[in-house]
Structures are given as structure tokens and as C-alpha cells.
């Protein structure tokens, strides 16, 4: 799709996104910049590595930033050394070292963004990581061109400069410089949590509907309170969550909110299509939409570095809304009666997650 100078295309499965990313890398003329939380040196990773080595040999500047925890198997691997030998530049953000094990920031404050920028003209972002096991996941990535790509490039450059050691810094916000799109970031600094505050603002201002898809639902008290208050004032609040994600602890934590949400009038849909749901999108009132790496949990919204496309473009928003509606088309909303019927053991596991909600 294209509007004015901005174009976009959504990919709704990880494998579809990878294919498009590889094609763009193959066609790169000047530069390839990758920022990833998970970059595994598995079968998929090797496909990317071969393309990146080839392009580097051709004179294309190739740079990679990976989170040292999310991509721990890539760090100091044979694949890393081979790439560097071919001229690929690689940095790992916030590495864990034996003398820093007790340091809070060694385990949190992660770089969770997913970015691919080619020639400074094409940008990919969303929830898709680079790991073979994610191949059939229901995820959402978007390929962008236009002014917003320069914002994505600016964010990458900033992270490149500060990696690997510096962890407490923030990015300058940019809101709709042209065409109704911006790339907004989140950082652990209170005044740098732009995605968090943008989400709160749009939940609180919603008048008709609010549709959110997230794989991990452990919101802060402020966010959860805003959601329930929106439902109580008549906003059609719908959450699409996985029936079972890839992180069981988070599933129990998410379930601990369900009765409170249902009592407030929030509609919850549990996705179970023999696929992991990993999409991170939200739309409200046909006037605001967002897609990116940020989950609706404390790690993403308060502790990590994240990046989201934010849009007020009506066509972009309508496409995100249509994706949500298609995902829930054959799902029935969760009822209080059905949820109360879960096992005593599950209820116990949900309750004991409350003390750690702030770090999930």
C-alpha cells in the first residue's frame, strides 16, 4: 500500500517476513543495518549470514546490533567470527559478564527492537525475530519506505554509537514529521518511555473502540487501570492474547488479570490456531495505530529498548484493524464462567506471579 511518499506492506507470518527481508538484503547497493533481539546461528541464521557475507564482499556496508542475552548463542560463535572476517561489523548490547552477574542491568534493560534498514530507504520492523523455530508463528512485520525510514536509521545510529556498554540513555521523540508516520522508541529512562506514554494516552482518549494484540500481557497498574476504565465508560475494548505462548510464566501472570478485566467489560479472545501468537499491534477509533516490538508488559514498556511504527494514516490503521478482526473472526470471547472453571492449581500459579509482575 502507499500513501503520498510512504509505502508499506504487512507480513503476517514469520517465514513471509524473512523472505521479504532476504530479498531486500540481496538487492542492497550501499548498506544493510540489522538490529535484533534474537539472531540465532541456526538454519535460518545461516541463510542470512551467507547473504550478508556476500554483500559485504561486494562493498556493501553491513552492520549488526544484537542483544547479548537474546542472541547469546550468536555471541562469540564461529558464525560471528566468520562474518567479521568478511568485513561485517557486529556489536552486542549490554553483555553479561561473570563480574556483573549481580548487576540488575545485566539481566534487564535489553535491546528488544527488530529492525532491518536497507540503503537507508527500506525499513522492516515488527515482532519477527530471526530464529527457525518461529517459522510458522502468527506475527506481524511491516516493510516501510518513505520519511519514516530516516527515523529508523537515526535510532539505529544512536544505538550503534552507545553499544555495547552504555545502557541509560534516551532517544529524542519524533511525531509525524511527514505523512502521518513516525518511529517511536522506548528506553528504561522514565522520560524516554515514549511508547508507554503514547499507549496510555490513546487508551485514555479512546471513545469508540480499542483493539490490542499482544503475546505477553502483564501490564503495569496504570495501563491496566486505563484499559478497565475505558471499558467501563463504554469503549469496545478487545484483547487478542495467546491461549498458550512460548513463556509459561507469563501465561500464568496474564491469567491473573482476566477476571478483573472481564468484570470491567473488557473482551478477551484467546488465539489457538496451532500457532504461537507473537503479534504486537494496537488500533483505536480509526485515528491511531501502532506496530512494533513492544509487548504489553513491564519489560517492554518500562525496562527495554523498543521501537514501534506509530501512525494516524487511516488506510494503515484500517489494515491493522482488518487483521485483528480476521484473527478473531472464528473465536468466541472468553466468558467469566469458562474462566472460573480452570483448575485450582492454575489459579494458585496465577496468584504467586503477582509479586514479580513488575519484571515480567
Image: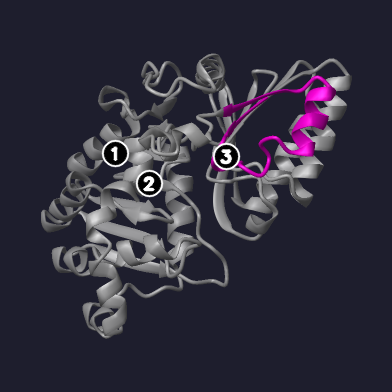
Q: Between 309 and 97, which is closer to the camera in this rendering? A: 97
Vertical side of 273 occupied by 321: above or below: above
Residues at marks 2 and 1 touching, judged by CB atoms closer than 8 Å: yes
Q: Which mark is residue 199?
A: 1
Q: Nearer the viewer, residue 328 or 135?
A: 135
Count the marks. 3
Q: Secondary structure at mark 3?
A: strand
Q: Is residue 310 visible?
A: yes
- Horizontal relation, residue 324 to residue 80: left or right: left
Which residue sits at x=38%, y=41%? 300
Observer-nearest residue: 156 or 79? 79
Q: Earlier in the sequence, mark 2 or mark 3?
A: 3
Which badge, 1 or 3, comes first in the chain's sequence? 3
Residue 124 in sight: no
Whether 70 is among the magenta residues is yes
Q: Earlier in the sequence, mark 2 or mark 1?
A: 1
Please tell me which residue is depicted at 36% across the width and 52% down the height of the picture: 212
Residue 82 x, y percent position in the rendering: 83, 31
Spatial CA span between label 2 and label 1: 9 Å
Please name the residue that numbered disc 2 is placed on: 282
To which quarter of the image does residue 100 belong?
A: top left
Q: How many residues crowd around disc 1 within 10 Å: few (fewer than 14), some, or many (20 or more)? A: some
Colouring scheme applied when the structure was drawn:
one colour
* Figure quadrant of the N terminus: top right
How many other residues sit within 10 Å of disc 2, few (<14), some (14-19) or many (≥20)?
Answer: many
Give x and y (percent) for residue 231.
Answer: 17, 57
Residue 63 painted magenta? no
Q: Nearer the viewer, mark 1 or mark 3?
A: 1
Start and end of the magenta stretch?
Answer: 64-92
Q: What is the spatial separation of the Cα atoms under label 1 and label 3, in whole angstroms? A: 19 Å
Q: What secondary structure is found at the residue carrying circle 2?
A: strand
Mark seen at residue 142: 3
Amino acid at each position: 500500500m502507499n500513501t503520498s511518499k510512504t509505502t508499506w506492506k504487512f507480513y503476517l507470518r514469520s517465514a513471509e517476513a524473512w523472505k521479504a527481508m532476504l530479498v531486500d538484503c540481496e538487492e542492497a547497493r550501499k548498506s544493510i543495518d540489522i538490529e535484533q533481539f534474537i539472531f540465532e546461528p541456526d538454519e535460518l541464521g545461516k541463510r542470512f549470514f551467507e547473504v550478508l557475507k556476500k554483500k559485504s564482499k561486494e562493498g556493501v556496508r553491513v552492520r549488526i546490533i544484537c542483544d547479548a542475552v537474546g542472541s547469546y548463542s550468536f555471541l562469540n560463535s564461529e558464525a560471528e567470527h566468520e562474518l567479521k572476517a568478511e568485513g561485517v561489523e557486529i556489536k552486542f548490547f549490554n553483555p553479561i559478564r561473570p563480574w556483573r552477574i549481580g548487576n540488575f542491568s545485566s539481566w534487564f534493560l535489553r535491546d528488544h527492537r527488530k529492525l532491518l534498514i536497507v540503503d537507508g530507504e527500506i525499513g522492516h520492523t515488527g515482532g519477527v525475530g530471526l530464529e527457525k523455530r518461529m517459522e510458522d508463528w502468527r506475527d506481524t512485520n511491516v516493510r516501510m519506505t518513505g520519511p519514516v525510514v530516516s527515523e529508523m536509521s537515526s535510532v539505529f545510529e544512536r544505538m550503534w554509537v552507545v553499544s555495547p556498554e552504555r545502557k541509560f540513555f534516551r532517544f529524542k521523540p519524533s511525531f509525524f514529521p511527514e505523512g502521518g508516520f513516525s518511529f517511536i522508541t522506548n528506553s528504561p529512562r522514565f522520560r524516554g518511555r515514549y511508547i508507554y506514554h503514547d499507549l496510555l494516552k490513546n487508551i485514555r482518549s479512546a471513545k469508540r473502540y480499542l483493539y490490542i494484540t499482544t503475546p505477553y500481557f502483564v501490564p503495569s497498574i496504570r495501563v491496566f487501570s486505563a484499559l478497565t476504565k475505558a471499558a467501563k465508560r463504554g469503549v469496545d475494548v478487545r484483547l487478542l492474547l495467546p491461549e498458550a505462548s512460548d513463556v509459561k510464566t507469563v501465561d500464568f501472570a496474564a491469567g491473573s488479570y482476566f477476571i478483573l478485566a472481564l468484570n470491567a467489560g473488557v473482551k478477551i479472545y484467546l488465539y489457538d490456531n496451532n500457532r504461537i501468537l507473537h503479534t504486537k499491534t494496537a488500533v483505536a477509533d480509526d485515528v491511531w495505530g501502532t506496530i512494533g516490538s513492544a509487548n504489553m508488559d513491564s519489560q517492554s514498556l518500562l525496562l527495554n529498548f523498543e521501537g514501534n511504527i506509530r501512525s494516524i494514516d487511516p488506510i494503515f490503521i484500517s489494515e491493522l484493524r482488518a487483521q485483528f478482526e480476521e484473527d478473531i473472526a472464528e473465536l468466541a470471547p472468553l466468558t467469566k464462567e469458562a474462566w472460573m472453571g480452570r483448575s485450582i492449581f492454575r489459579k494458585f500459579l496465577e496468584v504467586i506471579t503477582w509479586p514479580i509482575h513488575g519484571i515480567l
